[in-house]
Amino acid sequence: MTTLNAPLIQQAAASAAAGQHHPAGALYVVATPIGNLADLSLRAIHVLALVDVIACEDTRHSAPLLRQLGIDKPLIALHEHNERSAADAVLQRLSRGERVAYVSDAGTPAVSDPGAALVAAVQAAGHRTIPIPGASSAVAGLSVAGDMSGAGFTFTGFLPSRGGDRSKALKALAASPATQVLFEAPHRIAELADSLGALCGERPVTVCRELTKQFETVATMPAAQLPAWLAADANRARGEFVLVVHGAPELDAIAGPEAHDATLQTLIAALPLKQAVALAVELTGAPRNGLYERALALKRAAEAL
């Protein structure tokens, strides 16, 4: 564990942030590092030293971080299994005018981490919730993706783990032209790579592994190449992952109404027209009306032969 000069760090944090207003009776939602301790902001350090109590996703995880900073505060365990009940203890402290911080294990709370139910309960009780921004793996991954679609992004986080729900979510992701930001664990990354490769084809994907840590990896490639890239080195499947599925252009606007003829011809040969069009929409992400008109024209042309 890195040895820090805790008094000097707290002094620097106080110098940078002590002049700011930190109201009592408020919940401070504090972002912590996703791997690199140096990413913890001076403001976050000052707030953690200032509050009366710190609620943590896992006290065993947060306690060593606080010790490194020379911060000794009471800790409350507040995680996904007890968030609603533990929120009552936080509300009692806030009603007494105490300052409470909440930290998850890494990154920004309430973003694929516990915290949202706590924030909602605190706001419903009429207390302030104050964000202390910092590290976010989703935004960090997006920043190095080089995605030039300029159409915003959808934060998906972890996909459903169940087969049917997961398959449905993947198909919806592939059908959307918007940039998608995903999280994945190492034991499921190969499965996700196979699915993205099959559904997204040449659409670029940026895979970020172990962001801010020693073995950080960032690579961009067509989705179809992702399974082979992972398989080429066993180390590439280790660690925590952020994947950015780049935004896709509206294919019909670029290639014309015939862009999906091959798909439509295969489907209308085997299925009723409406069912064929519905499946084509799911597979291509193209607008339904355009696909329906094109499918109808193809069907009429085939019948005229």
Image (cartoon, helix red, strand yellow):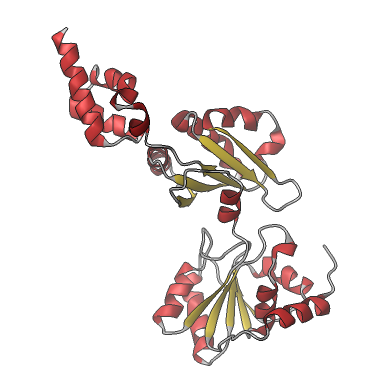
In the displayed structure, would residue 227 be above or below residue 210?
above
Residue 37 located left or right of residue 5:
left
In the displayed structure, would residue 124 be above or below residue 33?
below
Q: Residue at x 24, y 18 (%)?
A: 270
Residue 252 locus on image (x, y percent): 33, 31
Total marks in image: 0
In the displayed structure, would residue 22 be above or below residue 298?
below
In the displayed structure, would residue 209 be above or below residue 94?
above
Q: Residue at x 37, y 36 (%)?
A: 250
Q: Using the rendered image of the protein, determine whether residue 161 is visible from the camera's viewpoint.
A: no
Residue 201 locus on image (x, y percent): 48, 29
**Residue at the limit of the structure toward the bottom, as seen here:** 96
Q: Quadrant of the C terminus?
A: top left
Q: Quadrant of the N terminus?
A: bottom right
**Residue at the limit of the structure toward the top, as seen here:** 305
Residue 162 locus on image (x, y percent): 43, 44
Q: Residue at x 70, y 73 (%)?
A: 42
Residue in the foreground of this view, choosing between 239 and 209: 209
Residue 4 locus on image (x, y percent): 83, 70
Residue in the foreground of this view, choosing between 291 and 224: 291
Q: Residue at x 61, y 62 (%)?
A: 107
Residue 133 located left or right of residue 250:
right
Residue 287: image quadrant is top left
Q: Using the rendered image of the protein, determine whether residue 157 is visible from the camera's viewpoint.
A: yes
